[in-house]
Image (cartoon, helix red, strand yellow):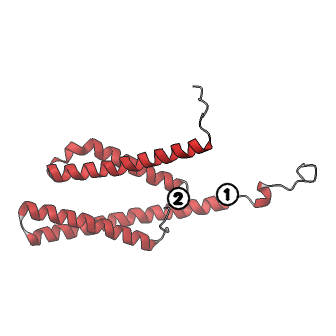
Amino acid sequence: MKEKKNRLDEMQEQKMLRIEHNACWLAFWGLFLVIFGQWIFYGPERMELVTGEWIVFLILALYIAAACIKNGIWDRKLKPSWKVNLFGSAIAGVAGGVIRFLTAYFRYGDKEGALAGGGIVCGNIFVICFLCLSLGLFIYRKRVERFEEEEPDEQEKFPKQNRNGRKQ
């Protein structure tokens, strides 16, 4: 199949990339909110109703994570470190634990049971999230090391030229 020529100039190309970037994150967080809303509205017993959304959300999340790590990108603002992984895992764990506590408490009215369930979910999410982020950090660091080793010297990139413009 013949590739079509890109008809956008550099400014239009940058704007198109920004539009696609915003659309990707709008879809990502929109799917997250839809899944969460349906989970609240229908309850956890009816999660089969959101299977399609859940699959698309997971594929999108895994693609973004894998593509970033493959290209040696961690985050725009956060440093790739164990502290960031601990903090992010703690936030995810607490959020999951609170959600589980609230749903169990409102469903069964048992404060102690809901607290125990929320604690278990909090711990499980924390551990799983921390392990996944740690694995991602390990792979990221290996990729960055490999990229740095592949980087040719500045002299190899720009060979010296004589006055006639010929390479020496």
Q: Give left or right: position of 68 versus 99.
A: right
For this orientation, the residue located farthest to the top is 1
Pick the residue in front: 57 or 21: 21
Residue 75 image point, x, y percent = 48, 61
Residue beneath the point at 93% across and 53% down: 163
Q: Is residue 106 above or below residue 165?
A: below
Work out whether residue 121 can be spotted: no
Decide: few, some or many residues near mark 2? Use Cα within 10 Å; few <14, some 14-19, many ≥20.
Answer: some
Q: Is residue 167 above or below residue 76?
A: above
Tag 2: residue type?
A: Ile
Residue beneath the point at 36% across and 46% down: 27
Residue 5 image point, x, y percent = 61, 31
Q: Nearer the viewer, mark 1 or mark 2?
A: 2
Report the residue marked by disc 1: 150
Q: Give me the disc on residue 73.
A: 2
Q: CA distance from mark 1 to mark 2?
A: 16 Å
* Element under disc 1: helix
Residue beneath the point at 56% across and 59% down: 143
Quarter location, residue 111: bottom left
Pick the residue in front: 16 or 33: 16
Residue 39 image point, x, y percent = 20, 51
* Element under disc 2: loop
Work out whether residue 30 can be spotted: yes
Q: Give me the disc on residue 120.
A: none
Tag 1: residue type?
A: Glu
Across the whole image, how many numbered discs are drawn on residues?
2
Residue 68 image point, x, y percent = 50, 54
Mark sitting earlier along the chain (1/2):
2
